[in-house]
Image (cartoon, helix red, strand yellow):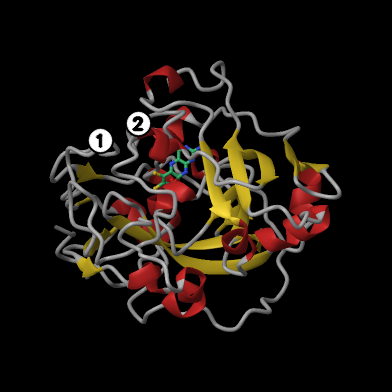
Amino acid sequence: MNDPEIPANEVTPESVFLRRRFFMKASIWAGSTLATAGLYRAFSPRSDVKNTGAAISTIPETMPQIPLGANDKPNTFSEIAGYNNYYEFSTDKYEVAAKARNFVTNHWSLEVGGLVQKPRTFGLEDLLKMDAIERTYRFRCVEGWSMVIPWVGFPLSRLLAMVEPMSQATHVAFETYYDIKQMPESPYAGIDLPYVEGLRLDEAMHPLTLMATGLYGKTLPNQNGAPVRLVVPWKYGFKSIKSVVKITLTDRQPPTTWNLAGPEEYGFYSNVNPTVNHPRWSQARERRIGEGGMRETLMFNGYAEQVAHLYAGMDLRRNF
Ligand code: MTE
Protein backbone atom coordinates (compact mmCIF):
# COMPACT_ATOMS: atom_id res chain seq x y z
CA MET A 1 0.00 0.00 0.00
CA ASN A 2 1.49 3.31 -1.00
CA ASP A 3 1.39 6.57 0.85
CA PRO A 4 -2.22 7.66 0.26
CA GLU A 5 -1.17 11.28 -0.24
CA ILE A 6 0.94 10.57 -3.29
CA PRO A 7 -0.37 8.64 -6.28
CA ALA A 8 1.97 5.75 -6.94
CA ASN A 9 2.33 6.50 -10.63
CA GLU A 10 3.41 10.09 -10.17
CA VAL A 11 7.02 11.02 -10.81
CA THR A 12 8.40 11.74 -7.39
CA PRO A 13 11.24 14.16 -6.85
CA GLU A 14 14.05 12.49 -4.92
CA SER A 15 13.73 14.87 -1.96
CA VAL A 16 10.01 14.19 -1.59
CA PHE A 17 10.64 10.51 -2.04
CA LEU A 18 13.19 10.41 0.73
CA ARG A 19 10.80 12.06 3.17
CA ARG A 20 8.19 9.44 2.52
CA ARG A 21 7.91 6.13 4.18
CA PHE A 22 5.67 3.76 2.47
CA PHE A 23 4.81 0.15 2.54
CA MET A 24 4.40 -2.17 -0.31
CA LYS A 25 3.73 -5.73 -0.94
CA ALA A 26 6.71 -7.94 -1.01
CA SER A 27 6.49 -10.84 -3.32
CA ILE A 28 3.79 -13.35 -3.91
CA TRP A 29 6.65 -15.74 -4.30
CA ALA A 30 7.74 -15.86 -0.67
CA GLY A 31 9.34 -19.21 -0.10
CA SER A 32 11.42 -19.22 -3.25
CA THR A 33 15.12 -19.90 -3.09
CA LEU A 34 15.69 -16.31 -4.08
CA ALA A 35 13.10 -14.91 -1.76
CA THR A 36 14.21 -13.25 1.42
CA ALA A 37 11.39 -10.89 2.29
CA GLY A 38 8.12 -11.83 3.86
CA LEU A 39 4.74 -10.60 2.71
CA TYR A 40 4.06 -6.92 3.38
CA ARG A 41 7.59 -6.14 4.38
CA ALA A 42 8.18 -2.46 5.03
CA PHE A 43 10.03 -0.71 2.26
CA SER A 44 11.62 2.39 3.65
CA PRO A 45 14.27 3.71 1.33
CA ARG A 46 17.53 4.35 3.10
CA SER A 47 18.41 8.02 3.17
CA ASP A 48 22.09 7.08 2.91
CA VAL A 49 21.61 5.64 -0.58
CA LYS A 50 22.84 8.69 -2.44
CA ASN A 51 24.21 8.86 -5.93
CA THR A 52 27.86 9.46 -5.15
CA GLY A 53 29.21 8.15 -8.46
CA ALA A 54 31.33 10.19 -10.83
CA ALA A 55 29.57 11.68 -13.83
CA ILE A 56 29.88 9.70 -17.07
CA SER A 57 29.67 11.63 -20.31
CA THR A 58 27.44 10.05 -22.90
CA ILE A 59 27.01 10.35 -26.64
CA PRO A 60 23.65 10.58 -28.43
CA GLU A 61 21.85 7.29 -28.90
CA THR A 62 21.88 5.87 -32.43
CA MET A 63 19.32 3.11 -31.89
CA PRO A 64 15.71 3.70 -32.81
CA GLN A 65 13.41 4.49 -29.92
CA ILE A 66 13.24 1.59 -27.48
CA PRO A 67 9.64 0.99 -26.47
CA LEU A 68 8.72 2.03 -22.94
CA GLY A 69 5.06 2.28 -22.02
CA ALA A 70 3.47 5.56 -20.94
CA ASN A 71 3.27 4.07 -17.46
CA ASP A 72 6.92 3.04 -17.40
CA LYS A 73 8.39 5.84 -15.30
CA PRO A 74 12.01 5.38 -14.24
CA ASN A 75 12.35 4.25 -10.65
CA THR A 76 14.09 6.65 -8.29
CA PHE A 77 17.78 6.27 -7.57
CA SER A 78 16.98 5.21 -4.00
CA GLU A 79 14.71 2.44 -5.20
CA ILE A 80 17.26 1.16 -7.71
CA ALA A 81 20.22 1.38 -5.34
CA GLY A 82 18.40 0.46 -2.13
CA TYR A 83 16.78 -2.85 -3.07
CA ASN A 84 19.26 -5.26 -4.63
CA ASN A 85 20.11 -8.84 -5.28
CA TYR A 86 23.85 -9.33 -4.86
CA TYR A 87 24.25 -12.56 -2.93
CA GLU A 88 28.00 -12.21 -2.51
CA PHE A 89 27.29 -9.32 -0.10
CA SER A 90 23.95 -10.28 1.43
CA THR A 91 20.81 -12.25 0.70
CA ASP A 92 18.79 -9.39 2.22
CA LYS A 93 17.92 -6.93 -0.55
CA TYR A 94 17.78 -4.01 1.89
CA GLU A 95 21.22 -4.79 3.30
CA VAL A 96 23.22 -5.09 0.10
CA ALA A 97 23.86 -1.35 -0.27
CA ALA A 98 25.41 -1.05 3.19
CA LYS A 99 27.36 -4.28 2.96
CA ALA A 100 28.81 -3.44 -0.45
CA ARG A 101 29.73 0.11 0.55
CA ASN A 102 33.44 -0.60 0.98
CA PHE A 103 33.80 -2.87 -2.04
CA VAL A 104 37.07 -1.82 -3.70
CA THR A 105 36.67 -1.70 -7.48
CA ASN A 106 39.51 0.52 -8.63
CA HIS A 107 42.34 -1.21 -10.49
CA TRP A 108 39.62 -3.34 -12.07
CA SER A 109 40.41 -5.47 -15.05
CA LEU A 110 38.11 -7.34 -17.38
CA GLU A 111 39.72 -10.21 -19.23
CA VAL A 112 38.11 -11.08 -22.57
CA GLY A 113 39.37 -14.28 -24.17
CA GLY A 114 38.61 -17.82 -25.26
CA LEU A 115 37.70 -18.35 -28.91
CA VAL A 116 38.78 -14.89 -30.09
CA GLN A 117 41.49 -13.64 -32.43
CA LYS A 118 42.60 -10.81 -30.16
CA PRO A 119 42.28 -11.65 -26.45
CA ARG A 120 42.56 -8.55 -24.37
CA THR A 121 42.41 -7.31 -20.80
CA PHE A 122 40.50 -4.08 -20.39
CA GLY A 123 41.27 -1.75 -17.51
CA LEU A 124 38.57 0.27 -15.85
CA GLU A 125 39.79 3.38 -17.70
CA ASP A 126 39.35 1.54 -21.03
CA LEU A 127 35.78 0.63 -20.10
CA LEU A 128 34.89 4.13 -18.94
CA LYS A 129 36.42 5.53 -22.14
CA MET A 130 34.11 3.46 -24.37
CA ASP A 131 31.51 5.86 -25.80
CA ALA A 132 28.68 5.53 -23.35
CA ILE A 133 25.00 5.86 -24.17
CA GLU A 134 21.94 6.12 -21.95
CA ARG A 135 19.22 3.49 -22.16
CA THR A 136 16.20 3.23 -19.91
CA TYR A 137 15.06 -0.39 -19.72
CA ARG A 138 12.42 -2.33 -17.92
CA PHE A 139 14.11 -4.81 -15.56
CA ARG A 140 12.14 -7.87 -14.41
CA CYS A 141 13.40 -10.09 -11.61
CA VAL A 142 12.44 -13.77 -11.69
CA GLU A 143 10.98 -13.32 -8.20
CA GLY A 144 8.17 -11.15 -9.54
CA TRP A 145 9.27 -7.57 -8.98
CA SER A 146 10.35 -5.08 -11.60
CA MET A 147 11.84 -1.63 -12.04
CA VAL A 148 12.59 0.84 -14.81
CA ILE A 149 16.28 1.72 -14.79
CA PRO A 150 18.10 4.46 -16.68
CA TRP A 151 21.38 2.70 -17.43
CA VAL A 152 24.58 4.17 -18.83
CA GLY A 153 26.83 1.82 -20.75
CA PHE A 154 27.78 0.48 -24.14
CA PRO A 155 26.55 -2.43 -26.26
CA LEU A 156 28.40 -5.66 -25.44
CA SER A 157 28.69 -6.22 -29.21
CA ARG A 158 31.21 -3.37 -29.35
CA LEU A 159 33.49 -5.02 -26.81
CA LEU A 160 33.18 -8.39 -28.56
CA ALA A 161 33.98 -6.86 -31.94
CA MET A 162 37.24 -5.55 -30.49
CA VAL A 163 38.43 -9.07 -29.63
CA GLU A 164 37.21 -10.61 -32.92
CA PRO A 165 35.30 -13.80 -32.06
CA MET A 166 36.39 -16.90 -34.02
CA SER A 167 33.86 -18.63 -36.25
CA GLN A 168 33.64 -21.63 -33.86
CA ALA A 169 32.41 -19.41 -30.99
CA THR A 170 28.72 -19.98 -30.25
CA HIS A 171 28.36 -18.79 -26.64
CA VAL A 172 29.70 -16.22 -24.22
CA ALA A 173 30.51 -17.02 -20.57
CA PHE A 174 30.69 -14.34 -17.86
CA GLU A 175 32.20 -14.41 -14.39
CA THR A 176 31.84 -12.09 -11.39
CA TYR A 177 34.72 -10.96 -9.19
CA TYR A 178 35.01 -13.09 -6.11
CA ASP A 179 37.02 -12.43 -2.97
CA ILE A 180 35.84 -13.74 0.36
CA LYS A 181 37.80 -11.01 2.14
CA GLN A 182 35.76 -8.35 0.37
CA MET A 183 32.59 -10.44 0.54
CA PRO A 184 32.66 -11.93 4.05
CA GLU A 185 29.01 -13.04 3.97
CA SER A 186 29.45 -14.94 0.72
CA PRO A 187 29.72 -18.37 2.41
CA TYR A 188 26.06 -17.92 3.41
CA ALA A 189 24.92 -17.06 -0.10
CA GLY A 190 23.67 -20.58 -0.73
CA ILE A 191 25.05 -20.59 -4.27
CA ASP A 192 28.40 -21.62 -5.69
CA LEU A 193 30.73 -18.69 -6.30
CA PRO A 194 32.08 -17.04 -8.33
CA TYR A 195 28.73 -16.19 -9.90
CA VAL A 196 28.71 -17.24 -13.54
CA GLU A 197 26.35 -16.55 -16.41
CA GLY A 198 26.12 -17.15 -20.12
CA LEU A 199 24.46 -16.10 -23.33
CA ARG A 200 24.30 -17.45 -26.83
CA LEU A 201 26.60 -15.40 -29.07
CA ASP A 202 23.67 -13.92 -31.04
CA GLU A 203 22.03 -12.83 -27.77
CA ALA A 204 25.32 -11.28 -26.64
CA MET A 205 25.67 -9.46 -29.97
CA HIS A 206 22.11 -8.13 -29.92
CA PRO A 207 22.07 -4.32 -29.82
CA LEU A 208 19.87 -4.29 -26.69
CA THR A 209 22.50 -6.18 -24.66
CA LEU A 210 24.48 -3.67 -22.63
CA MET A 211 27.55 -3.60 -20.48
CA ALA A 212 26.45 -1.02 -17.91
CA THR A 213 29.01 1.22 -16.28
CA GLY A 214 26.52 3.57 -14.67
CA LEU A 215 22.99 4.59 -13.90
CA TYR A 216 21.32 7.98 -13.64
CA GLY A 217 24.30 9.53 -15.47
CA LYS A 218 26.91 8.44 -12.91
CA THR A 219 29.15 5.45 -12.33
CA LEU A 220 27.45 2.33 -10.95
CA PRO A 221 26.89 2.02 -7.21
CA ASN A 222 28.68 -1.03 -5.79
CA GLN A 223 25.39 -2.73 -4.96
CA ASN A 224 24.28 -2.51 -8.60
CA GLY A 225 27.39 -4.28 -9.88
CA ALA A 226 30.21 -1.76 -10.03
CA PRO A 227 32.21 -1.13 -12.00
CA VAL A 228 30.71 -2.98 -14.96
CA ARG A 229 27.76 -5.38 -15.24
CA LEU A 230 25.72 -7.06 -17.91
CA VAL A 231 22.16 -5.92 -18.68
CA VAL A 232 19.93 -8.13 -20.83
CA PRO A 233 16.51 -6.46 -20.60
CA TRP A 234 14.38 -9.26 -22.08
CA LYS A 235 15.66 -11.88 -19.61
CA TYR A 236 15.01 -12.37 -15.91
CA GLY A 237 17.29 -10.21 -13.80
CA PHE A 238 19.61 -12.99 -12.62
CA LYS A 239 21.06 -13.23 -16.15
CA SER A 240 22.37 -9.67 -15.72
CA ILE A 241 25.56 -10.62 -13.92
CA LYS A 242 27.30 -7.98 -11.82
CA SER A 243 30.91 -6.85 -11.41
CA VAL A 244 32.21 -8.82 -14.38
CA VAL A 245 35.91 -9.73 -14.42
CA LYS A 246 35.98 -12.35 -17.14
CA ILE A 247 34.28 -12.92 -20.48
CA THR A 248 35.07 -16.10 -22.40
CA LEU A 249 33.93 -16.97 -25.91
CA THR A 250 33.25 -20.68 -26.15
CA ASP A 251 31.77 -23.35 -28.44
CA ARG A 252 29.34 -24.72 -25.86
CA GLN A 253 26.58 -23.57 -23.56
CA PRO A 254 28.30 -22.38 -20.40
CA PRO A 255 27.19 -23.30 -16.87
CA THR A 256 25.14 -20.62 -15.09
CA THR A 257 24.84 -20.09 -11.33
CA TRP A 258 21.07 -20.36 -10.85
CA ASN A 259 20.77 -23.23 -13.28
CA LEU A 260 23.40 -25.10 -11.27
CA ALA A 261 21.57 -24.27 -8.04
CA GLY A 262 18.13 -25.33 -9.33
CA PRO A 263 18.09 -26.81 -12.83
CA GLU A 264 14.33 -27.49 -12.69
CA GLU A 265 13.63 -23.89 -11.75
CA TYR A 266 16.10 -21.71 -13.62
CA GLY A 267 16.89 -22.48 -17.24
CA PHE A 268 19.73 -21.28 -19.39
CA TYR A 269 17.55 -18.95 -21.47
CA SER A 270 15.39 -17.42 -18.75
CA ASN A 271 13.61 -15.13 -21.17
CA VAL A 272 10.82 -13.19 -19.50
CA ASN A 273 7.71 -15.14 -20.44
CA PRO A 274 4.32 -14.62 -18.75
CA THR A 275 3.01 -17.88 -20.25
CA VAL A 276 5.66 -20.14 -18.74
CA ASN A 277 5.39 -20.36 -14.96
CA HIS A 278 8.20 -20.99 -12.58
CA PRO A 279 7.49 -24.42 -11.03
CA ARG A 280 6.56 -22.74 -7.75
CA TRP A 281 4.84 -19.52 -8.86
CA SER A 282 3.19 -17.77 -11.78
CA GLN A 283 5.18 -15.38 -13.96
CA ALA A 284 2.07 -13.74 -15.43
CA ARG A 285 2.21 -10.61 -13.27
CA GLU A 286 4.74 -8.47 -11.50
CA ARG A 287 4.99 -5.85 -8.82
CA ARG A 288 6.66 -2.66 -10.01
CA ILE A 289 8.78 -1.33 -7.15
CA GLY A 290 7.24 1.91 -5.88
CA GLU A 291 3.77 0.97 -7.05
CA GLY A 292 0.79 -0.64 -5.37
CA GLY A 293 -0.88 -3.64 -6.94
CA MET A 294 0.34 -5.81 -9.75
CA ARG A 295 0.74 -5.34 -13.49
CA GLU A 296 0.80 -7.77 -16.39
CA THR A 297 4.21 -9.12 -17.34
CA LEU A 298 4.98 -8.62 -21.03
CA MET A 299 6.41 -11.27 -23.37
CA PHE A 300 10.17 -10.85 -23.52
CA ASN A 301 9.61 -8.06 -20.98
CA GLY A 302 8.12 -5.92 -23.75
CA TYR A 303 11.04 -6.38 -26.16
CA ALA A 304 9.42 -9.09 -28.33
CA GLU A 305 9.59 -6.97 -31.47
CA GLN A 306 13.35 -6.69 -31.05
CA VAL A 307 14.26 -10.20 -29.89
CA ALA A 308 11.54 -12.78 -30.68
CA HIS A 309 13.31 -13.73 -33.92
CA LEU A 310 16.26 -15.05 -31.88
CA TYR A 311 14.01 -17.87 -30.65
CA ALA A 312 12.02 -18.61 -33.81
CA GLY A 313 11.01 -22.27 -33.94
CA MET A 314 12.17 -22.97 -30.39
CA ASP A 315 9.92 -24.56 -27.78
CA LEU A 316 10.05 -21.87 -25.10
CA ARG A 317 8.42 -24.14 -22.55
CA ARG A 318 11.27 -26.57 -22.86
CA ASN A 319 13.94 -23.90 -23.34
CA PHE A 320 12.85 -21.91 -20.30
N1 MTE B 1 25.22 -10.90 -10.05
C1 MTE B 1 25.97 -11.39 -9.04
N2 MTE B 1 27.30 -11.47 -9.20
N3 MTE B 1 25.44 -11.81 -7.87
C2 MTE B 1 24.08 -11.79 -7.68
O1 MTE B 1 23.62 -12.19 -6.60
N4 MTE B 1 21.88 -11.25 -8.63
C3 MTE B 1 21.12 -11.24 -9.89
C4 MTE B 1 21.68 -10.21 -10.87
N5 MTE B 1 23.12 -10.29 -10.93
C5 MTE B 1 23.26 -11.29 -8.73
C6 MTE B 1 23.88 -10.83 -9.92
C7 MTE B 1 19.70 -11.02 -9.67
S1 MTE B 1 18.80 -12.31 -9.03
C8 MTE B 1 19.10 -9.84 -10.02
S2 MTE B 1 17.39 -9.65 -9.94
C9 MTE B 1 19.90 -8.68 -10.44
O2 MTE B 1 21.30 -8.93 -10.43
C10 MTE B 1 19.59 -7.51 -9.51
O3 MTE B 1 20.20 -6.34 -9.99
P1 MTE B 1 20.02 -4.97 -9.19
O4 MTE B 1 20.34 -5.21 -7.77
O5 MTE B 1 20.94 -3.99 -9.85
O6 MTE B 1 18.55 -4.58 -9.37
Q: Residue 238 placed where, x, y %?
A: 42, 47
Q: Quadrant of the C terminus?
A: bottom left
Q: Position of residue 239 (x, y in %)?
A: 47, 49
Label 2 sits on residue: 91
Q: Quadrant of ligand 1?
A: top left
Position of residue 194 in the picture relative to residue 272 (left or right):
right
Residue type at mark 2 is: Thr
Q: Which residue lies at the image location 64% right of the left edge and 43% below the top edge?
A: 227
The answer to whether 241 is drawn above or below residue 216 in the figure is: above
Q: Residues within 10 Å of mark 1 (few under 14, many from 20)?
A: some
Would you name the residue on which mark 1 appears?
36
> Residue drawn 44% across and 64% down?
234
Q: Is residue 155 left or right of residue 91?
A: right
Q: Amino acid at mark 1?
A: Thr
Placement of 19 over or under 155, stated as above or below: above
Residue 258 visible in rendering: yes
Occupied quadrant, residue 133: bottom right
Q: Position of residue 186 (x, y in %)?
A: 45, 22
Q: Is residue 35 left or right of residue 80?
A: left
